[in-house]
Amino acid sequence: MDTVLDSYVAGSWVRPDVPGDPAHDAVTGEVVARASAHGIDLHTMAVHARTVGGPAVRALTFHQRAARLKQLARHLGEHKDEFYALSRRTGATDRDSAIDVDGGIGTLFSYASKGVRELPNDVVVLDGAPEQLGRAGTFLGQHLYVSRPGIAVQINAFNFPVWGMLEKLAPAFLAGLPTIVKPASQTAYLTHAVVRRIVESQILPEGSLQLLCGAPGTLLFELDEQDHVAFTGSAETATVLRNHPAVLHRGVRLGVEADSLNCSILGVDVRPEDPEFELFVKAVVVEMTAKAGQKCTAIRRTLVPHAMVGPVVDALRERLAKVVVGNPADPTVRMGALASSAQRDEVRRAVAELRGSCDLVFGDPDHVTVVGADAREGAFISPLLLRARPDAEEPHEVEPFGPVSTVIGYADTTEAVRLAARGRGSLVASLVTHDPEVAREVVLGLAPWHGRVLVLDRDDAAESTGHGSPMPTLVHGGPGRAGGGEELGGVRGVLALMQRTAVQGSPDVLTAVTGRWTKGSRRLTGETHPFRKSLAELRIGDTIVSAPRLVSRADIDHFAEFTGDTFYAHTDPEAAAANPLFGGIVAHGYLVVSLAAGLFVDPDPGPVLANFGVDNLRFLTPVKADDTITVTLTVKEVTPRISADYGEVRWDALVTNAADEPVATYDVLTLVAKQWPLPDAAAAEG
């Protein structure tokens, strides 16, 4: 196989004018593909994304976008065997491919779920509650997120050709942005295969995904202030991008994930006989050998108490000696090749620099025993363990992007935190300890310098996803040297790609803009009880105002006896009178809410299928015996579910007393049929 990779541009696969530089099989050295963007019309790509892809994505609600991501994840899962076969040619074992291929597909599934569960079935996301800007409540402010009419450009590293693309695509698609993918040329053939399967499926709207194989050329000059570039790669290239005119002068947003000297710290409390010792050693070896150490989250610095340096080095050497290096197709192989011979040369250079202040205690950068392949043809290298001498500088400055880690001794937790901080900002740090006090001290010291901190011990080890695994629900990125960018983090990663705007206006205007009823806006009352209306019939603002209901002392006594809630404010007149907040017997808050439900509920079978929760419940004014309560219930938000015959309705509930003072406020959450009678019931009656 020696294929010239075409790019997907404006709905067509376009072959470059010249073949481009070769990408070699990491195991055999054979040419796999050639990548070039020579002759690719970058202006057309940008225009197509902006005028075709963007409008098509933004025409979908968040739930509809999430449904496409779920469908896409299932589709790609059907082609994993194809992707795994190509992944082996990048030097990845099947275990490595699970991180890349399955991890990428899993990220699509995660964002599909988040999109439905945590975002509205709309195109606007509200940020917080309205802010009252005037005394009378007729002038309010509301923060909201909207999609930008821009493009998401991703420039990816060679080490994760599938996950690196999908983890950026999923939040961008949910945010309403079309994506242009520029993979690293060494492994672009795997990204190309995945994109081709995506395009063939026609699951995503045309223009929402384009692929550029080869150098990005003048692509950034096609971008403007509405666009976002997500870069993963070296600090050197990141500096070039930060100084690009499009970023400096045209307002293009740039997110960077760059070099990272991640560390793992063995707690001062851990001894060789403790379970945590074995957990620590195993984690370091896993991070050294997974993807042959070519992970931006791999453990580069292994920090241990001075007294434990010897035992840790011995244990690591013993475990590393069992690692089989070779052809990923061989089931006995645990560590495959680096992505290219050039990458191997770069690792050797970095190790030579480290050896200026460190001693090599395991492995040989120039010789390795290989299973199932020719070490002279493939980009193989041995796992390499170094031990830092006192006051070593290089381990805190040089990142060997391969199966390399350096053991560094420390005196106490204060020094451990100081050494970790010498990495000048990293993606992740881990701490292995079973002492909660050590955990608190170290985590609070590490947090300002790291995007993620893992605390590992015997209690969480069975479920831990490991030091080096970014999770779609947690932020991925880091300060300082790590680039200062942030990705993933569940819905945080979506909102980061949208525009937050503060909108000011009257309650009625905010209701119209946001699609959610705002306090102070018009309530719609009529003869039909809102509980008799299907989802299709309900309107924002539909309201029922109940008749008053007396809350007697007998009601309070009965509720106390029936529930067992005999708190003195409900049962002891003298003690209740002495309470400065009550001044006498008051009704239970939950009695008030229960009575309120009886006032607004329509008891007969109807479109309201279930009550599934209450949000934001607050008790504002105590209800004394023989006071009356009234409930005003208003449709606040209507969210149809795509995959069901019902949707969610959020109701604003306001309970007032005889003096019209607010007693309680809360949101009632119900499931309401889209049609009534239900389609099956109507068919049965017919």
Image: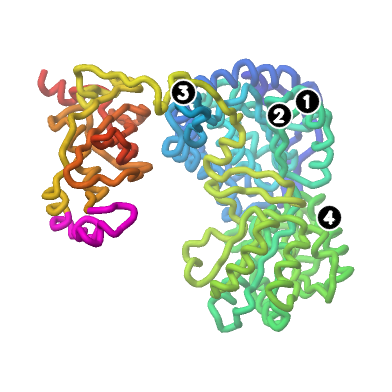
Identify residue for label 3: 138
| Residue situated furthest right in the rendering | 356
Check disc 4 and give the amino acid type. Asp
Q: Which residue is mark 4?
A: 345
User: Which residue in the protein does label 1 denote?
Assistant: 250
Residue at (68, 56) in percent of width and height? 448
Earlier in the chain: of badge 1 and badge 2, it is 2
Work out how far the residue at label 2 is from the one at label 3, CA to CA, in angstroms.
51 Å
Whichever of callouts 2 and 3 sits on the residue coming sooner in the sequence is 3
Cα distance between the residues tagged 3 and 1 = 38 Å
Q: Say which of marks 4 and 3 sits in front.
A: 3
Q: Amino acid at mark 3?
A: Thr
Query: CA–CA distance between discs 1 and 2?
Result: 22 Å
Amino acid on which disc 1 is placed: Arg
The secondary element bearing badge 2 is classed as loop
> In what quadrant of the picture does the C terminus appear?
top left
Residue denoted by label 2 = 212
How many numbered circles does the render carry? 4
Residue 412 spot, x, y in % from top left: 70, 77
Q: Between disc 4 and disc 1, whose residue precedes?
A: 1
